[in-house]
Image (cartoon, grey):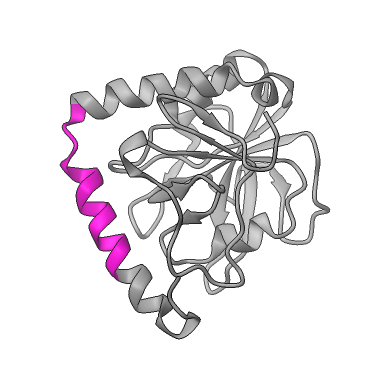
Amino acid sequence: MDSLANAPACKKDLRAKLKAQRSALPVDERQRIDAAITQRLLELPAYAQAQVLLPYLSFGSEVSTYAIIQHAWDQGKTVALPYCVPGTRAMRWYGVTSFADLIKSPLGVLEPDPATAPLLLDENSPALAGFLALVPGLTFDQQGYRLGYGGGFYDVFLGRFAGTSVGLCREQQLCSAIPCLSSHDLPVDLVVTEERVLAPKGRG
């Protein structure tokens, strides 16, 4: 494993490689794989038992979460999407009941409107059990560690989250071990691919 001094450069190079690999996958193949990932997630006891879902809203070539969110609404679950507080590494989670309620951020990503959506969780809220969070990542390893996009938002969030965290990852981007890990990198509880569910912490 690389030293912490080399971690930023190592992660930058790996992110570029993984983004290119992900984008190169044909759209119809991505859709097929993502449908299988969605089905595996919906079959998890942790999903069935969760009353509150904290998903990311997929963007570009990320593993799609739209069908998962719609299913959660159909099942009567509360769904809250993240809003990244500018100038910080904090996320606030706002309840949403329709994709039509979302607005486009300055970066072009759809997110809840903090002026109108109800606030469910913020950076000062107590860590809550019984919630299920979907965590984005460019890759996950078999120990549950992830390589994100470098903003640090989910590292902060996972550090105080007491619910179940789930990484969604296509099998081709799963790795045996994340290189260049830093002290603030934290694993998720479960990783779901189109072929299997990994539970490095023994959860399911």
> Which residue sits furthest bottom?
5
Look at the image and tell me in which quarter the N terminus lies.
bottom left
Q: Going 47% across and 40% down the picture, which residue do you hit? A: 102
Q: Going 50% across and 42% down the picture, which residue do you hit? A: 56
Q: Vertically, is 37 above or below 114?
A: above
- Magenta residues, start to end: 13-27
In percent of width and height, residue 32 lies at 29, 20
Left or right: 48 in relation to 19: right
Look at the image and tell me in which quarter the C terminus lies.
top right
As rendered, which of 136 and 169 lies closer to the eye? 169
User: What is the magenta segment's predominant secondary structure?
Assistant: helix
> Which residue sits furthest right?
126
Left or right: 19 in relation to 55: left
The quarter holding residue 59 reads: top left
Q: Vertically, is 177 above or below 48?
A: below
Left or right: 19 in relation to 153: left
Residue 201 on the magenta segment: no
In percent of width and height, residue 99 lies at 46, 30
In percent of width and height, residue 16 lies at 25, 62
Residue 24 on the magenta segment: yes
Q: Vertically, is 198 above or below 179?
A: above
In percent of width and height, residue 37 lies at 43, 25
As rendered, which of 141 and 155 lies closer to the eye? 141
As rendered, which of 76 and 36 lies closer to the eye? 36
The quarter holding residue 78 reads: top right
Tally the marks: 0
